[in-house]
Image (cartoon, coloured by chain):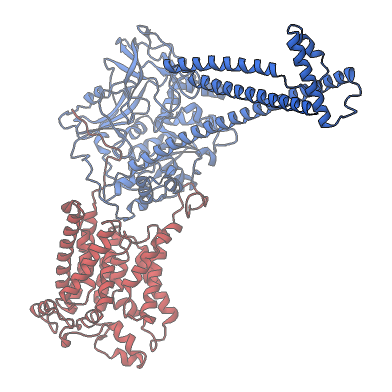
Chain colours: A red, B blue
Amino acid sequence: MALAQQSSPHARNARSTSQVMLWVILAALPGLLAQTLFFGWGNLINVVWCISVALAAEAVILKLRKRPVVFFLKDNTAAVTGLLLGLSLPQFAPWWVSAVAVIAAIVMAKQLYGGLGANPFNPAMVGYALVLISFPVAMTTNWAQPGLLWETAPGFGETLGMIASGQQTAVDAFTMATPLDEYKHKIASHTATEVLAHPTFGEGIARGWEWVNAAFLTGGLILIGLKIITWHIPVSMLAGLALMSLAFGSNADQYAPLSLHLLAGGTMLGAFFIATDPVSSASSHHGKLIYGACIGILIYLIRTWGAYPDAVAFSVLLMNFAVPFIDHYTPPRTYGHHKPRRGVPGKSQG
Amino acid sequence: MTQLWDFSGGIHPAENKHISTTQPIKKAGVPPLLVLPLQQHIGEPAEPCVAIGERVLKGQKVADVTGGMGVPVHAPTSGTIESISLQPVPHPSGMSDWCITLRPDGQDEWITLSPIASYREQDRETVLDLIREAGISGMGGAGFPTNIKLRPPKDRKVNTLILNGAECEPYITADDMAMREKADEILAGLRIMAWILRPERCVIAVEDNKPEAIAALKKAADGTQTEIAVIPTKYPSGGEKQLIQILTGMEVPSGGIPADIGVMCQNVGTAIAVSAAIFRGEPLISRITTVTGQAVTNPGNFEVLIGTPIDYLLSRGGLDENALHRLVLGGPMMGYTLETPAVPVVKTTNCVIAATEKELPDPAPEQPCIRCGACAEACPMELLPQQLFWYSKAGELDKAEHLNLFDCIECGICSYVCPSSIPLVQYYRAAKGEIRVQQAEQLKADRARERFEARQARLEREQQEKEQRRKERAKAAAEAQARKQAEAEQAETPDGPAQPASERAAKAAQVQEALARKKAKAGQPETAPSKAPEEPASEPAPDIEALEKQLSQAIAKLNTMQSMLDDAKAENADNVDKLERAVTKNHDRVKRAEEALAEAQRTVNATEAQTTDS
């Protein structure tokens, strides 16, 4: 009788990394549904395309790196990267822009740094920032005009055709500037009321976008409820953004109002699904609060005074740089110690 | 209602306690052979005090610790000592250790017991000695000798005495069943310990998943000052540090002991043993052990004699050998696997899990850490398990130590929650071991360096002393020489040095003298040596003949040496170097002698020439 020899603990929790990632994908589905309902088939097609490219790219690079392909593909992390890009790219982004973003994310940002768990930067955001800087026309003119799927949105075939054609700019009739873009560029010469008359804002805060953000918020709350993410990063990020807006942007004739900051653009997707990427974010509770708050502040700074209408990708990447620094100074206080042991060995006490 | 605090982190694993709580505690009976390890707890191993073949009675001491920390071992039943030998013992490494093997004679004959009805009339030290003599060590965890634990440092006053009945690990129900059935004994044991320590507060802490035990304890404690604290079920609430935090809100300082903050924890099983030792005079010869897991058909709790082989105990639990996949001693969070069931139950054995493969499956292959932080969320010590993991894995042990690696209690939660199936605790154990080895080596190296430096200093000192002595001797010799010379000068040429002749005149005089000596010597060879000292000479003149003699001697010696060296070289002897040096030295000597002779001859020739010229 050969008895199994194992080191304790002998009992294990059932939830694996691939299950965690699967939950992330499932929690993002309400957002994808809202995007499809309010902006047409673009995001759904992008998501499918990006996930396919992501899995293919991951398989190839794993093979080149002589790593077990199936073992790593099963962890679902490449699928999540593809999903996040599909959710964030413009609805009519040409197929090759998406492919460049996904390949940059998987090959450069993730695998060349050592693969899962070793990447200092959020892979999806590296891919996004790369195509945003490289193909500004494709990335700014391809946002779908808000319109209900069953009413004004272009049909599935039409959308697929526009994406597959590879044209930098989609058919003008179907696109429209995003609310943040519109507000940012018009407010200098118009009053808030004039700006908000634009159809991109619709009746509420930002037509379609408000529902998409609400859906991502719902999905994020599910993730918190399942203890897949903690509340620290989303709450501090939203708080940072809100406080900046309240402090500097209370005049709607000058700056975009808080409601627009929170419910237009990629705010909720960023707060719950992107900034919370465990690999590239701060690890302790204190660190997460600082990390999230700084992302929120940066988003506001770039949206308001920077060249880009939205800023989730840049802000997350900038704070990714700061993660080792934040982690270094925000260890928790261990039981039985008077204070946390910050810094490096031999240079502090605790 | 007792005020409770919460501790950070913690988990709620599947309890699986119901498996073993359906039946009351059963007696495991007397196995055919009992194996009593001489070391059953931390501290020193006991030394046997019985002989092979000797008949011992139940409760008779068979081994004791003579010096150092430890408690005696007693015979769990009457019988014959069969051997004292190395046997496999319960240990994570599967090692063997010295054990006394006892073959029971079936008579179960007790020694004469001397119970104490009223311990309060005794001296506290006497009672502590009785606890030691009963062989009681902590029955919950590491098995620290109870009598020593009950003697906290003099400057530490225990204000709160906690009886730990939390039993937070899944599967284990030994304390639960003991509390249900032996609540009165637990209270009696607690009272004895409280009498020794005189704390202000006595608490028995039980997790709220044990309502029967709570009811029994409350009934037994009714009318006493003892609090029964019902704490929320959360692993590891029964960890000493966590339990103290739950009940007092205080934290045991890192590297310290609970007594530092005026707290002491004892296990409920220990309280039962103390009560039995005092009121019945019985030493610790049995304990309650849970036999559970899906590979046993008749799980439950057994009152089992110390030394009973686990396989005997498993057979009492109805083991299905085909279903058995993993045999765990202790709980599923902190216990360790056994290679063989042929190891004995010891004083700390609280649970045996005979698990099927489905029940405790082999872990999935380790995946990369995704920094999800689930480990840090759940860590009850508020450590950073993922950072500790990187540093432990990368061998950056100083950084791991800096992040309080040694505060890790190895509760297993981080590994339990890890979605990447990383055996984190194993990494920490390895890193701790590595650091301990390094520290031991460092200590050894430091001592070696100290020894070396001390030796160097001593050698230097001796050298200096030697040098000093040599200088003193040289000085003394020089003084003596000077004195002698002065005396000689005073005696022979009292005013010689006072009238220094011109150099040339002196030299001429010397040469004249030398010539005179030479002539005299040529004429009267026998008398020449005896005459020479009589010659008044402040400086020795070059004596060609003596020099010639010296030279020929030196040449002869050199030749001898040379031939010896040649022989040595031919034989490849090991004194070749020495001889070579000697030859060189002699060679130099010959050369010097030759030069001296040549010089003398030149001087003589010159003088003669001079003399002839003038």
Q: Position of residue A343 (x, y in %)?
A: 47, 55
Q: Is residue A186 above or below residue A212?
A: below
Residue B298 visible within the image: yes
Residue at 35% over, 41% down: B168
Q: Is residue B171 above or below residue B526?
A: below
Residue A73 visible within the image: no
Q: Position of residue B100 (x, y in %)?
A: 35, 15
Q: Is residue A134 above or below residue A196?
A: above
Determine the image quadrant of residue A281: bottom left
Outermost residue on the left side: it is A157
Q: Position of residue B377 (x, y in %)?
A: 36, 53
Residue at 82% over, 31% down: B503
* Left or right of residue A19, residue B41 in this image: right
Residue at 46% over, 14% down: B567
Q: Is residue B571 above or below residue A129?
A: above
Q: Position of residue B127 (x, y in %)?
A: 52, 23
* Left or right of residue B7, residue B509 in this image: right
* Left or right of residue B396, residue B565 in this image: right
**Which sits in the foreground, B493 or B60?**
B493
Residue at 38% over, 45% down: B395
